[in-house]
Image: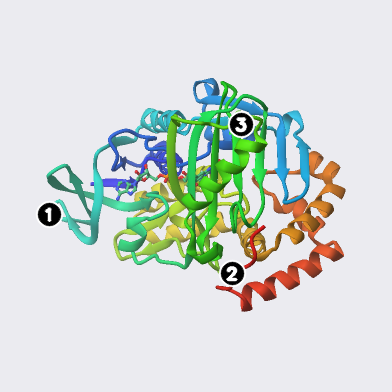
Amino acid sequence: MYDVVVVGAGPSGCMAAKYAAKSGASTLIIEKNANVGVPVHCAGLVSGRTLVESELRDTGSFMSNELKGAIIHFPNHDMHIEARADKRAYAIRRDLFDRALAREALKSGAELITNSRVIDMVAGTVDGSVKGMKIRVSEGNEVKEIGAKVVIGADGVRSAVADMAGLKFRKYMLSCVQVEGRHEAGDCAEIFVRRGIAPGFFAWIIPLGDGNARFGLCIDKRYSVSGSTSMHYFKKFMHMIKGYNRGSYPEGPYIKYSGGEIPITATSLRPPKTVRVMKDTGVILVGDAAAQVKPITGGGVYYGMKCGKIAGEIAAIAASNDDMHALYDYERRWRKEIWMEIAFGVWIHRLRCVLRDDEFDMIFRVLERGRTRIEREGDMDYPSRVLRELITRREILMLGTKGLIRYIYCRGLDIKEG
Ligand SMILES: Cc1cc2nc3c(=O)[nH]c(=O)nc-3n(C[C@H](O)[C@H](O)[C@H](O)COP(=O)(O)OP(=O)(O)OC[C@H]3O[C@@H](n4cnc5c(N)ncnc54)[C@H](O)[C@@H]3O)c2cc1C
């Protein structure tokens, strides 16, 4: 019987396991895939703060490129943002990053089993006498049982642990497609905002510094025309950048092809419930499983690790004191850290789902006026800090009101694509 069992060896799970083990809890990570970090479902764009949060010293082992800024392509304008040296973003290799995090968790005393999928769990008697959570794990053709006092569900966007623990909450899934391919120029990330390219989100090019780049997009399918898929938009996007990209269009064969989903909580009024306390055991959710993702950018690595640390520490305390009510402290703490940022992002997400291309161009004009401020104070982990002030400008407030009325009343109507 373990004090803490962490389901999922992504960044959130590895960090939770590291902190649980460091706090003295016997800790096991269960990962369904054969190798930690693959397959990759990520563009790998992270802030410097994320690297610090990871506590990994040898960042060179997973670093692909340092990006000097971003170009945001609005429907009819381009906005160039130069990042200050201390505010740069980095393109990383998520497979190597996740593996490095897992190694650190093991060094702290956690154990890891791979090729093992959690298929069921039930509170009850474990090992004949001790009370806790009985977790059924499938390993190939075998099913074995593992006991835990506390279970941390870090099993990603379609969390089985959340379902089994009855921790369901309403969320929308953004659907994403990405390839890696040849791309000659640039040390800036490029973002494409336009309904016809990526309704409800954006498309990206992230140069990797070795003549290749990641090309991808996400959509909120509720706002795609006639229910078109992310692949439909992706093909259109690749066709568009063929002309735009001065011939450095990735003709293929693509080096890596991936997809995935990003969870966005459906409401900004109430944070998701992420703790379930039973008599002798408890479950907490972390990372994508808890939709701890920035709705504006879809980034979840930083929040996942940050909340993973809290989850690990609190789970260890609850297990060592046999006091499952201590788990509620996790919920209080993560909400205090990031919920306001997520709630703000949910409003922005709603707005971008219903904006027309001319309205995106108006946003460009407002942002362009605040560009110096964005360059000086912009923060990809806490975008609301700068955006909040820009948003109080009169034009944006009016646009926001119009947009939200449209969001409430016109959902399901096709909004004209540019
Ligand atoms: C296309 C795309 C691009 C993205 N780009 C970025 C980006 O540039 N920057 C950024 O910060 N974020 C990005 N994200 C989001 C980011 O990938 C996630 O927020 C992050 O991976 C969440 O980490 P996690 O540990 O919570 O979950 P995951 O990384 O999803 O890890 C969950 C783990 O649980 C395992 N698992 C699942 N079910 C079970 C089970 N039943 N039993 C055992 N193991 C199980 C999985 O195999 C997986 O290893 C992107 C997402 C997508 C889809």
| 303 to 271, vertically: above or below | above
Residue at x 64% of width, y 27% of height = 66
Q: CA distance from mark 3 to mark 2?
A: 36 Å
Mark 2, residue position: 414
**Disc 3 marks which amino acid?**
Tyr
Q: Is residue 3 left or right of residue 336?
A: left
Nearest to the eye among marks 3 and 2: give it.
2
Mark 1, residue position: 128
Mark 3, residue position: 90
Q: Crowding at label 3, few (<14), some or many (≥20) Cα neighbours within 10 Å? A: many
Q: CA distance from mark 1 to mark 3?
A: 50 Å
Q: Earlier in the sequence, mark 3 or mark 2?
A: 3
Residue at x 72% of width, y 39% of height = 71
Q: Quadrant of the C terminus?
A: bottom right
Q: Earlier in the sequence, mark 1 or mark 3?
A: 3
Q: Crowding at label 2, few (<14), some or many (≥20) Cα neighbours within 10 Å? A: some
**Disc 2 marks which amino acid?**
Asp
Nearest to the eye among marks 1 and 3: give it.
3
Q: Earlier in the sequence, mark 1 or mark 2?
A: 1
**CB of mark 2 near ligand 1 (< 8 Å):** no
Element at badge 3? strand
User: Which residue is nearer to you in this view: 145 or 325?
Assistant: 145
Element at badge 2? loop
User: Which residue is nearer to you in this view: 383 or 270?
Assistant: 383
Residue at x 35% of width, y 32% of height = 109
> At which x and y percent is residue 385?
74, 51
> At which x and y percent is residue 262?
49, 52
